[in-house]
Amino acid sequence: MAFTNEQLERYSRHIILKEVGVKGQKHIMEGRVLIIGAGGLGAPAAMYLAAAGVGTIGIADADAVDLSNLQRQIIHASSDVGKPKVQSARETMNAMNPDAQVVTYREWINAANITDIINDKNYDFIIDGTDNFPVKFLINDACVMLKKPFSHAGIIRFQGQLLTYIPGKGPCYRCVFHNPPPPDAVPTCRQAGVLGVMGGVIGTLQATEALKFLLGMEGLLNGYLLTYNALTMDFRKVKLAPAHSCQVCGPEPSITTLIDYEQAVCDLREYHNN
Amino acid sequence: MSGQADARQTSARVDITDVVCPVTFVKTKVALEELEDGEVLEVRLNGGEPIQNVPRSLKDEGHKVTNVSQLDDGTFLLTVVKGGLL
Ligand SMILES: [Zn+2]
């Protein structure tokens, strides 16, 4: 793949980085990243990955843009209200960078479709931009079973967290959090509120993980949980150990098929709306 | 093309007089990417900002600038050995 002069100029700030260079930018442009959820986390992640030149970006979300999304889901504009989120996202991404091939999946992720979606473009890296526990565990289990690296993240109120799973290189999400809480035991950000910028901070860190993975770099958040408290402005990086008895990534897994956990009732309609 | 101190043959040439920073160094990096360590790249560049910065960036990345000469039209010619400082 030879760069056009326009591409050299577009990606010049990447190419001059020692850690990226021409080869690294080619890896980014050959990279395939799937973003599940076009909401608060997925919006900035999708925009930065498109801007960076990631060649194939899948985006999965069944929802339509709602006025209440616009306080934080910056990939959508006021004129997009009512439009499918995946369509609105694709338009924004291609306006920023026509090179990005954006593949849209206008469906809710569940045990029946997640494997096909991940395999559709044989994605290299998956970003969990959802806001509910059942789908977070489903993404974890599917990525463990398919040996795919992914970035988990969650945001609520003034708090955010993320961790990265890389097969064979540290714990999975279930090693740390075991099982989803009972439906309605924990508020989602729809019930609890979230400062709009939280998705920007954490979703951008997820995009950073995806780019570093595509570049073959070390120093990702596998084996760590990074938390951000916007009230005190504290970032904390906590070391995590793999759980040897993990139900899905341990040596004798008890979970070998994907599970659709029960949703909290009020989440059923809008469960990707971070 | 006189004044070339390095006896090794030039493997490739790149002209970056038609672009400005940072594309100057980007085009130089792209040209170097095609070469093996030890091969020689000749770079034609403008005076001022490019001649101040491009040789320095090349050294930072481990390439050796073995010759600099000025041409009659005021542009400069660099001779660069890929990976020559590694
Ligand atoms: Zn595990």
Image (cartoon, rainbow, N blue to C red):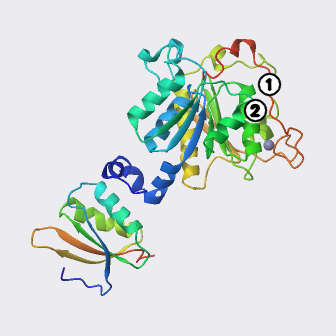
Q: In which quarter of the image is residue B76?
A: bottom left
Residue A261 circle label: 1
CB of residue at label 1: within 8 Å of ligand 1?
A: no
Q: Position of residue A114 (x, y in %)?
A: 70, 33
Q: Do labels 2 and 1 share a chain?
A: yes
Tell me the residue that label 2 is attached to.
A137
- Looking at the picture, how far across and down is residue A38, in whole percent? 56, 27
The secondary structure type at the circle numbered 1 is: loop
Residue at (77%, 38%) from the top-left corner? A141
Please identify the residue farthest to the bottom as the structure is shown: B7
Q: Which of A201 and A79 is in front in this view?
A: A79
Split into 4 quadrants, where in the image is the N terminus of chain A? bottom left
Q: Is residue A252 above or below residue A82?
A: below
Chain holding disc 1: A
**Quadrant location, ligand no. 1:** top right
Q: Which residue lies furthest to the left in this view?
A: B72
Residue A139, how many percent across, how many down? 71, 35
Whether residue A151 is visible to the viewer of this picture, yes or no, is no
Q: As displayed, is residue A156 above or below residue B2?
A: above
Amino acid under label 1? Tyr
Cα distance in 3D space between marks 2 and 1: 9 Å
> What is the crowding at mark 2: few (fewer than 14 residues within 10 Å), some, or many (at least 20)?
many
Q: Position of residue B50 (x, y in %)?
A: 24, 61
Which chain does the residue under circle 2 lie in?
Answer: A
> Between B51 and A129, which is closer to the camera in this rendering?
A129
Q: In which quarter of the image is the C terminus of chain A?
A: top right
Q: Quadrant of residue A126?
A: top right
**Residue A96 shows in the view:** yes
